[in-house]
Amino acid sequence: MTTIETPTHLRENPLEIAREQLRRIAGPFDIDDNLVQVLSECKKSIEVSVPVNMDDGSTRVFTGYRVTHNVARGPSKGGIRYHPDVTADEVKALAMWMTWKCALMGIPFGGAKGGVIVNPKELSRRELERMTRRYTTEIINEIGPEKDIPAPDVGTDSSVMAWIFDTYSMNKGHSVLGVVTGKPLEIGGSLGREEATARSALYVLRDALMYESRSLDGLRVAVQGFGKVGSFLARFLAEDGARVTAISDSTTALYNPNGIDVPAAFAHKRETGSLAGLKEADRIPHEDLLLLDCDVLAPCALEQVITAENADKIKARIILEGSNAPTTPTADEILDANGVLVLPDVLANAGGVVVSYFEWVQGLQEYFWKEAEVNAKLNDIVTRAFEETWECAQSRSLSMRHAAYGLAVRRVAEATTTRGIYP
Ligand code: NAD
């Protein structure tokens, strides 16, 4: 039988990209070669096999990973991804980016990430629960509120976090609220967590527009990906006066130059599970969405969608990175040369980990905050990080990405030097 290989979204090795980005900022930010060497590697990486009894009586064995990149500034933190394209190097790269993101936000965490090679849409809910509980059990010695704290990412949601929380707690003999974030509200989740990633992207765009004396009013935005990040971002943008002219999910890309009815799209996606069949917008090829004539392009799906092949054809003047690593380093150079303002992932999508930090704090204190308090504190942290990054980019004539990564890596390097290399 011929095996048809599933096309992967990873054209380049993501870990090599992450290392290349680190090397690029090491010079301008005076990061010692020895530290670059330390920070290029992940502290710990485990691969586990996850056998699951399927509903039809068969057994399937999935492969899972959990990686900690760095803990110099605090316990490691990062999402768990369920996706058929997950690779060990992708998880390592995502863990490294989490380290920089937490440092840029000034929150006391290092970076981690986890993943299972699986298409969650092919599993029944019971199968998904059994797989999650077994995966959690396999990594149980690696995670914990003072050690490594998972959260949702692509293909996982608050239900998956609830099963992780329950599995860990059953093994410990008591509820451990701080073991995972992105939990449902009724078992210790935080108000504002679900929308937090999109909210930070909105704040970052608003701040950037302010520096250019522009506003969201009438701004034409194309949003790629309509999951936890993209759907809320489209909704917030539309609510604040922008015109969301295009949206997409893995099945369908839609365009309406007069503006998509975002609440209708939101409801349609919730009801049917996809954007397919949504009325009053034209179906376009997926790759065309990235090249549309618009003011802002917000990639909110997977990595490496803006590459050397299409970067030159992008018409948007601002790229708002809701997803992690949507732009390859070569594409970055092209966009920079073309004067496109890239608002980088570690800044734009950091709201998720910031409110995860709030959820962790609330869980440890068993004292929960009002939503307005969560959003105000998120705004303070993201705006401060934006201003620091903007100022650094202006004063050193760097791109926002290099400024953000440089500031973050320098903080991690300082913490590593201050602690010293054990023993
Ligand atoms: P999700 O699984 O909720 O949504 C992903 C969306 O992307 C889905 O709508 C899916 O259909 C769509 N998609 C997949 N392939 C696509 C394609 N080729 N074209 C168009 N759409 C496609 O995941 P999410 O949590 O929204 O995460 C999206 C990105 O944001 C990821 O890069 C993730 O690492 C990053 N991120 C997420 C969070 C978070 O809190 N969830 C925080 C920070 C960063």
Image: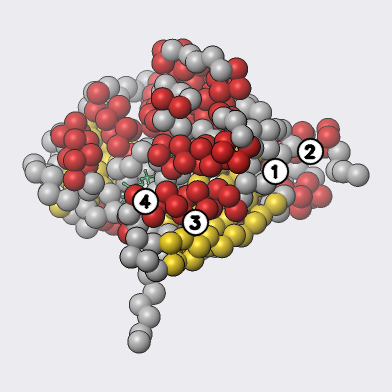
Q: Nearer the viewer, mark 2 or mark 4?
A: 4
* Colour scheme: secondary structure
Type of amino acid at the residue the image marks with label 1: Asn
- Contact between labelled residues 1 and 4, with CB atoms less than 8 Å apart: no
Task: Count residues near mark 3 (Cα–Cα under 10 Å), then give few for <14, some for 14-19, many for 20+.
Answer: many
Q: From mark 1 to mark 3, how far is it between C-alphas?
A: 21 Å
Q: Secondary structure at mark 1?
A: strand
Q: Is mark 1 within 8 Å of ligand 1?
A: no
> Looking at the image, which residue is at 39% across and 55% down?
127
Comparing 39 with 116, the one in front is 116
Comparing 21 with 209, the one in front is 21
Q: Secondary structure at mark 2?
A: helix
Type of amino acid at the residue the image marks with label 3: Val
Find residue 150 and report its horizontal and vertical position in percent. 55, 40
User: Badge 3 is on which residue?
Assistant: 116
Q: From mark 2 to mark 4, how far is it between C-alphas?
A: 43 Å
User: Badge 2 is on which residue?
Assistant: 416
Q: Secondary structure at mark 3?
A: strand
Q: Nearer the viewer, mark 4 or mark 3?
A: 4
- Contact between labelled residues 2 and 1, with CB atoms less than 8 Å apart: yes
Q: From mark 1 to mark 2, how far is it between C-alphas?
A: 9 Å
Please indicate, yes or no, whether residue 40 appears anywhere in the rendered image.
no
The disc at residue 70 is 1
| Dot 3 or dot 2, earlier in sequence | 3
> Looking at the image, which residue is at 41% across and 65% down?
8
> Looking at the image, which residue is at 46% across and 32% down?
183
Find residue 13 and report its horizontal and vertical position in percent. 54, 62
User: Badge 4 is on which residue?
Assistant: 126
